[in-house]
Image (cartoon, rainbow, N blue to C red):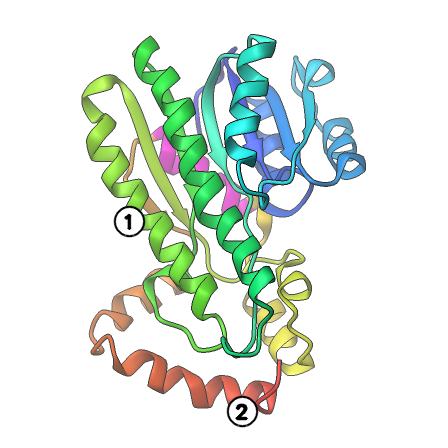
Amino acid sequence: MLEPSYGMALVTGASGGIGKEFAIQLSHGGWDLILVGRNEEQLEKTKRSLDGRRAESSIVIKADLSERGAGIALHSDCRKRGYEVELLVNNAGSGLFGLSTELPAERIESMLNLNILSLTSLCGLFGRDMESRGSGRILNVGSLAGEFALPYFASYAASKSYVLGYSLALRAEMRASGVSVSCLLPGYVRTGFDENAGIASPAYRAFSERSGMDAAKVARVGLRSLGKNRPYAIAGSRNKIASCLAKLVPRSALPAMAKPLLDKMTRGRP
């Protein structure tokens, strides 16, 4: 866990799931919070659930980071308000399930804006501020899916592969400046991901629920990893084993092996 602090932390996607748990745990640790998300009502609920010394002064900012330029606008807003962000938690993200040729192009672009472009802009802009002060921390939330090429999750998995690669490169670039960068790789988590990704299959969703980790535990893994200045952390022992085993299989074979399993679970349909 991160040491108690009086600094300011910005958490994206803080309206629920892992993002809400990040906010709760950071608030308990003494951090001032900036809660960012699309749903202002849910963000206010998150704020009311905080119990830290500075909980009541937590700031809610409504922003849709799936829109082009939203990351730049968020950073500009924080600068105008005089906020100095010492910890950036890039948690906001979304997924899409289905055949790549059948998914609406606008939904794919929106997801990639959120998972890649806004995250990259926020890292670069807030990272520059941190470099100028000689201190700061960045935690990017990727996914275990980013280690694989997954049929029906093609764009999502590829976007999370980007998050890990970008985070590791950014970490190397910023190491000498006093800024640390880490990446969290969760597997299945008990959140609203399946519904939001458009997964209707009862069999798949039951499997996801059985395999899923508690969001609070996943958030603890991420904050502990950042506190220990680790380059990345895979949440869950089963996920760590899966990651190791996957490295033993030829990269091109994994999607070919995964597709019939997903077909059987979903009967070939989302």
Q: Chief secondary structure of the magenta span?
A: helix
Residue at image location 64% in from the left, 73% down from the top: 199
**Which contiguous range is marked in magenta?**
217-227
Q: Is residue 198 shown above or below 140? A: below
In three-dimensional space, the C-alpha distance between marks 2 and 1, rounded to whole angstroms, equals 32 Å
The percent coordinates of residue 152 (x first, y second) are 49, 76
What residue is shown with label 1?
165
What residue is shown with label 2?
264
The percent coordinates of residue 12 (x first, y second) are 57, 36
Residue 179 horizontal side relative to residue 190, left or right: left
Residue at image location 45% in from the left, 65% down from the top: 155
In this rendering, the label closer to the viewer, 2 or 1: 1
Which quadrant is the N terminus positioned in? top left
- Amino acid on which disc 2 is placed: Lys
* Residue 177 shown in magenta: no
Q: Quadrant of residue 197?
A: bottom right
Q: Is any atom of residue 221 visible in this view?
A: no
- Amino acid on which disc 1 is placed: Gly
The percent coordinates of residue 153 (x first, y second) are 48, 70
Residue 235 horizontal side relative to residue 69, left or right: left
Which quadrant is the C terminus positioned in? bottom right
Q: Is any atom of residue 102 visible in this view?
A: yes
Front-most of residues 100 and 13: 100
Q: How many marks?
A: 2
Q: Secondary structure at mark 2?
A: helix
Residue at image location 68% in from the left, 44% down from the top: 16
Dot 2 or dot 1, earlier in sequence: 1
Residue 95 horizontal side relative to residue 180, left or right: right
